[in-house]
Image (cartoon, rainbow, N blue to C red):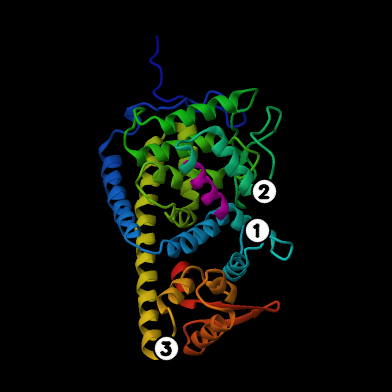
Amino acid sequence: MPQQPIYRVNPDRNTPWNDLPPLPIHEELYKNVEVYEQLGKAKEALALLAGRSVAIPNQALLVNSITLQEAKDSSAIENVFTTDDDLYQAFSDKKFDDAVSGSTKEVLRYREAIWEGWEYLNEHGEFDVDYFINLYQEIKETGDSIRPPFARTYIRQGGSGPNAGKRIYTPPKGKGVLEEKLQNLVEFLNDDEIPPKEPLLKMAIAHFQFEAIHPFRDGNGRAGRILNIHYLTVKGLLELPILYLSRYIIEHKQEYYDTLAGVSQRGAWEDWLLYMLRAVESTARLTYSKVNDILEAKEAVLEAIVTEKSFQRPDQLVDAIFTQPFTKVSHLTDAGIYAENTARNYLNELAEMGVLEKKVIKGRHYYQNRELEGILSY
């Protein structure tokens, strides 16, 4: 009798992969020197970021700014684009109305999905199928759920080359098939006794499995990237969902899709795991750098205004203007920091100092923190 393969691949890209192997995968697929060397580098970088973020008194500095840029970049992977100015303006207004472009709304919904999912997990304590459905519904602003058995879903080759438009993968389908595979994924995520014991390896494996199941009509890539961040917070590797992972994927987008396909077509798990571990290492270091730059810029501005001006509560003022790139008078009044006239006068003085740039957009007044925006955009 021929020996059974360690991992059953998808033999036909045009046929639904209903034989997608359940988790866990065989340990031989990830237990090698190169994977574990890269795992060590990723863990070190992530621990550095986690330690830095925990030490920050005002975590809103990270909550708004870092996750907003993550939402923008993750959406861009799916060809959903918006400008920084449009995004920051809409976020500062807290509006999703018709005056906001569709792509900007999608990015803002992605950010909301990050936080709603994080709160869901804090409340429930573990993953379940509803967690995934809620992510999808928030990202796509829909009441739709897991795609029905009759839905035609497949992945096509992007770009403009000779293979553009060709099917490269057809996910599972059929009555109860997706539900069964999602439940298996949920059990894998929640049970720490299911190998591998290393959370970063488990995150990478779970991300592939979710993308391979492809349970929704749309938004699977974005939901899968949010899953990465949430899993790390649930397992205590991060306190807040602030890992800036999508920047790496944008810069190595073709490799991302190639290594995903390599698992389904050849069982090339090592390449996929190395890709994800490098992504964690690179983006943890990038996010760490951004956090430090934000704090340094904030301290420099605080020192400047304390030296030159006699503002009341300058520390709270500086915290406010570094919480998001666009500040409005209402942000200061709603927070109870100042009365309206005082808030307006202080923001205007900061604009005169060159700390902020005053802008009028469609009759509304905004004060743009160019230092913060520059840090977020590199």
Q: Which sits earlier in the primary sequence, circle 3 or circle 1?
A: 1
Query: Is 297 or 277 nearer to us in this picture?
Result: 297
Q: Quadrant of the C terminus?
A: bottom left
Q: Which circle marks residue 105 in the picture?
A: 1
Residue type at tag 2:
Glu
Q: Secondary structure at mark 3?
A: loop
Badge 2 is on which residue?
141
Specify whether 19 is left or right of 267.
right
Distance from Cα at disc 3 to Cα at disc 1: 39 Å
| The magenta stretch spans residue 258 | no
Q: Residue at x 37, y 61 (%)?
A: 286
The x and y percentages for residue 222 are 55, 47
Distance from Cα at disc 3 to Cα at disc 2: 46 Å
Badge 3 is on which residue?
310
Crowd around label 3: few <14 · some 14–19 · many ≥20 (10 Å)? few
Q: Which sits earlier in the primary sequence, circle 3 or circle 2?
A: 2
Q: Are marks 1 and 2 in contact (CB under 8 Å)?
A: yes
Give the magenta range: 111-121
Is most of the magenta stretch helix, strand or loop? helix
The x and y percentages for residue 173 are 63, 27
